[in-house]
């Protein structure tokens, strides 16, 4: 299902990753100009998770290269916002870093008579990160992680924590409300996705950020901080936290030894028609080409990907 507009155009020029606001991702697309007639361009609007946005931004250029009649806009607004936009008929595909909620599905059906359909195109691990000044690897249990994030443990000198060279108050860094990454962390660690129970709520001075990258940047510059990001956002400048003795890696997620993991989704309103452009977009991401860009984004492909050298 798609509501994109058609234009009579033939020549296409790439718009290279235009930043559209802190934490809200990028728009990617093709500018089309008249050059004497021919061809129609169809616009597909993709909105939602800033985690999945990394996949969809990277895959946009090769997808449009293989489908010159399709123009994509990709915008990271958060999983909840993207699904809400989809239900309201304002985008073609929502990106979500957690499963569709029952309430969202009920809302979709009440308003449109159609159920939401989610497609798991990737796997991801949620990695705890601390500043690179750590003098040794931090290894925490799930219970200790929860205690840090709800404020029960608030100081790096707490006897429950190993000495990694930090001291003073712990700065907890989290995602904002409506974030799929926040919901996944809450479900897997805090014990309650909606944080209705007191011990599942974040400590009062927790610092909310609107993207994985912003959490990474805060932890990178703040030796007191601890936060969580998707696997695709790990990089130089932070140290990953082991959970119950297991490091978050592609291998430990695949073999299920690292337990803080999730799936990443593309979501549509109903099942797209097999000959629709929306279906082509979804289906392409399951192809070896599409799964290659899932892997290149730093996440885990769920189907065979093409070889790197092709």
Image (tube, helix red, strand yellow):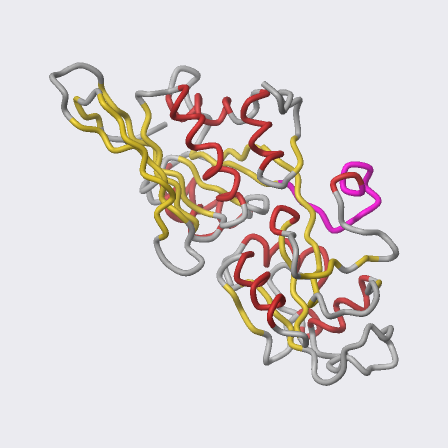
Which residue is pictured at 51% across the width and 33% down the height? 117
Name the image quarter holding the N terminus: top left
The stretch drawn in magenta includes residue 72: no
Q: Position of residue 276 (x, y in %)?
A: 38, 20
Q: Nearer the viewer, residue 162 or 97?
A: 162
Q: Position of residue 150 (x, y in %)?
A: 69, 74
Q: Nearer the viewer, residue 296 or 142?
A: 296
Name the image quarter holding the C terminus: top right
Q: Quadrant of residue 30?
A: top left
Q: Nearer the viewer, residue 302 or 138?
A: 138
Q: Position of residue 278 (x, y in %)?
A: 40, 26
Q: Is residue 97 left or right of residue 125?
A: left
Which residue is pictured at 68% across the width and 61% down the height? 238
Name the residue at the left extreme: 36
Name the residue at the bottom extreme: 168
Q: Please count the marks in the image.
A: 0
Q: Is residue 309 above or below residue 56?
A: above
Q: Is residue 301 left or right of residue 110?
A: right
Q: Quadrant of residue 239?
A: bottom right
Q: Is residue 131 left or right of residue 194?
A: right
Q: Nearer the viewer, residue 10 or 180?
A: 10
The stretch drawn in magenta includes residue 260: yes
Q: Position of residue 151 (x, y in %)?
A: 70, 78
Q: Is residue 199 above or below residue 184?
A: below
Q: Is residue 82 above or below residue 195?
A: above
Region in magenta: 252-263
């Amino acid at each position: 299902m798609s509501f994109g507009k058609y234009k009579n155009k033939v020549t296409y020029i790439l718009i290279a990753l235009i930043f559209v606001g802190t934490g809200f991702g990028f728009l990617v697309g093709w500018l089309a100009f008249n050059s004497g007639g021919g061809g129609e361009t169809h616009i597909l609007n993709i909105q939602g998770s800033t985690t999945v946005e990394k996949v969809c931004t990277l895959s946009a250029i090769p997808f449009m290269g293989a489908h010159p009649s399709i123009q994509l806009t990709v915008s990271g607004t958060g999983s909840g916002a993207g699904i809400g936009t989809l239900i309201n008929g304002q985008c073609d595909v929502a990106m979500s870093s957690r499963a569709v909620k029952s309430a969202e599905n009920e809302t979709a059906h009440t308003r449109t008579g159609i159920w939401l359909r989610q497609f798991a195109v990737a796997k991801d691990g949620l990695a705890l990160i601390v500043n690179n000044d750590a003098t040794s690897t931090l290894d925490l249990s799930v219970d200790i992680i929860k205690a840090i994030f709800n404020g029960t443990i608030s100081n790096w000198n707490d006897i429950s924590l190993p000495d990694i060279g930090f001291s003073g108050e712990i700065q907890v860094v989290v995602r904002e409300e409506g974030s799929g990454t926040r919901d996944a962390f809450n479900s897997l660690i805090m014990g309650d996705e909606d944080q209705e129970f007191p011990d599942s709520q974040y400590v009062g001075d927790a610092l909310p950020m609107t993207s994985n990258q912003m959490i990474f940047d805060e932890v990178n510059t703040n030796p007191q901080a601890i936060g969580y990001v998707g696997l695709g956002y790990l990089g130089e400048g932070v140290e990953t936290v082991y959970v119950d003795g297991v490091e978050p890696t592609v291998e430990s997620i695949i073999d299920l030894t690292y337990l803080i993991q999730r799936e990443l989704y593309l979501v549509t309103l109903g099942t797209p028609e097999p000959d629709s452009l929306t279906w082509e977009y979804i289906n392409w991401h399951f192809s070896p080409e599409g799964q290659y860009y899932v892997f290149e984004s730093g996440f885990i492909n769920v189907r065979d990907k093409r070889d790197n050298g092709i």
